[in-house]
């Protein structure tokens, strides 16, 4: 039986008064890390999220292995019964989740393991094991007119009537309240958590395990809205780049290189013209302790 429309007969879209040419752009499905990747360098974004097959990455970084190991150990510590949330199981938890890639040799790996275990022991001494978080490694998600956003927060606490976003950090550099204030990811987690749990969420914290410090910022609705606006602007730029390539533009022009200090740490340094000119970093560079500054008289 013919299924085509009779010439001159209006279809469902016309009958409903719809004009598909005027439909808004699709929502960009993204995470904070995806947005930050494009903002840092569109070419790096293209290598990681657009090109298929993706270009080969460089060797794994030891600092990424260290961070992943500590994060997973903390996640599993919170999963223990309250009575077992002590320092005793930390070595076992860390060993079970330890990622071995990127280290110079076994001696360095053992030294970093011992350092990480000491961080964890000092950190959990500051925690109340009975103060159950709202979420640990919890995915939060929400939508705006531009974004379909999701991300995984390290920890979401409840303090009084409000939620607090907690992010663990294991890098060498000390952190300040400016780092917490400027973090797009933390602001977007707060935005999504407030919507998802229907509870205010303004405070964001960076818990820096190596220095046993907390860098915090108390957002306002306006400051979170500014971060969301930044995220939406980046999403529009991503969509525009996709459209330009689909229309026949040169991908190198749609996703330009953005040379800078991050090039030395880029996974795609060897396949990127700008990265090839950057200083070479060994995979274990960022886990080597920095020498303390010497004060001159």
Image (cartoon, grey):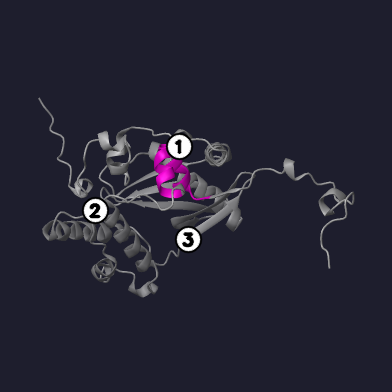
Q: Residues within 10 Å of mark 2 (few under 14, many from 20)?
A: many
Q: Is residue 264 magenta?
A: no
Which is more foreground, mark 2 or mark 3?
Answer: 2
Vertical order, 269 against 253 (above or below): below
Q: Secondary structure at mark 1?
A: loop
Q: Is residue 98 left or right of residue 199?
A: left
Q: Secondary structure at mark 2?
A: helix
Whole-angstrom CA distance, mark 2 to mark 1, is 28 Å
Between 112 and 205, the one lying in front of the other is 112
**Residue 162 in sight in this render:** yes
Between 59 and 110, the one lying in front of the other is 59
Q: Which residue is mark 3?
A: 138
Quadrant for the N terminus in the image: bottom right
Between 176 and 105, the one lying in front of the other is 105
Vertical order, 202 against 4 (above or below): above
Image quadrant assignment for residue 40: top left
Q: Tell me which segment is drawn in magenta.
A: 30-49
Residue sitting at x 33%, y 39% = 272
Q: Which residue is mark 1?
A: 255
Residue sitting at x 88%, y 55% = 6
- Main SS, magenta region, reads helix
Q: Are marks 2 and 3 in contact (CB under 8 Å)?
A: no
Vertical order, 13 against 237 (above or below): below
Q: Is residue 41 magenta?
A: yes
Residue sitting at x 13%, y 61% = 106
Whole-angstrom CA distance, mark 2 to mark 3, is 25 Å
Q: Residues within 10 Å of mark 1 (few under 14, many from 20)?
A: many
Image quadrant assignment for residue 43: top left
Q: Is residue 91 left or right of residue 208?
A: left
Q: Is residue 60 left or right of residue 41?
A: left
Quadrant for the C terminus in the image: top left
């Amino acid at each position: 039986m013919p299924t085509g429309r009779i010439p001159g007969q209006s279809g469902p879209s016309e009958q409903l008064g719809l004009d598909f040419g005027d439909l808004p752009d699709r929502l960009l499905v993204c995470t904070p890390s995806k947005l930050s990747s494009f903002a840092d360098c569109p070419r790096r974004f293209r290598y990681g999220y657009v090109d298929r097959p993706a270009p080969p990455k460089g060797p794994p970084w030891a600092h990424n292995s260290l961070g992943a190991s500590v994060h997973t150990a903390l996640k599993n510590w919170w999963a223990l019964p309250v009575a077992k949330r002590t320092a005793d199981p930390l070595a076992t938890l860390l060993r079970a989740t330890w990622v071995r890639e990127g280290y110079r040799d076994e001696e360095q790996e053992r030294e970093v393991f011992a350092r990480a275990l000491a961080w964890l022991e000092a950190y959990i001494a500051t925690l109340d094991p009975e103060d159950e978080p709202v979420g640990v490694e919890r995915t939060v998600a929400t939508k705006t007119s531009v974004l379909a956003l999701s991300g995984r927060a390290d920890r979401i606490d409840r303090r009084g009537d409000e939620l607090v976003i907690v992010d663990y950090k294991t890098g060498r550099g000390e952190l300040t309240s400016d780092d917490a204030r400027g973090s797009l990811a933390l602001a977007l987690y707060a935005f999504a958590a407030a919507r998802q749990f229907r509870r205010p969420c303004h405070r964001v914290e960076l818990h820096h395990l190596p220095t046993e410090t907390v860098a915090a910022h108390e957002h306002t609705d306006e400051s979170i809205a500014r971060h969301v606006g930044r995220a939406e602007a980046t999403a529009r730029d991503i969509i525009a780049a996709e459209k330009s390539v689909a229309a026949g533009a040169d991908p190198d022009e749609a996703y330009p290189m953005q040379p800078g200090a991050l090039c030395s740490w880029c996974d795609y340094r060897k396949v990127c013209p700008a990265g090839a000119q950057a200083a070479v970093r060994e995979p274990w560079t960022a886990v080597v302790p920095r020498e303390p500054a010497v004060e001159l008289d």
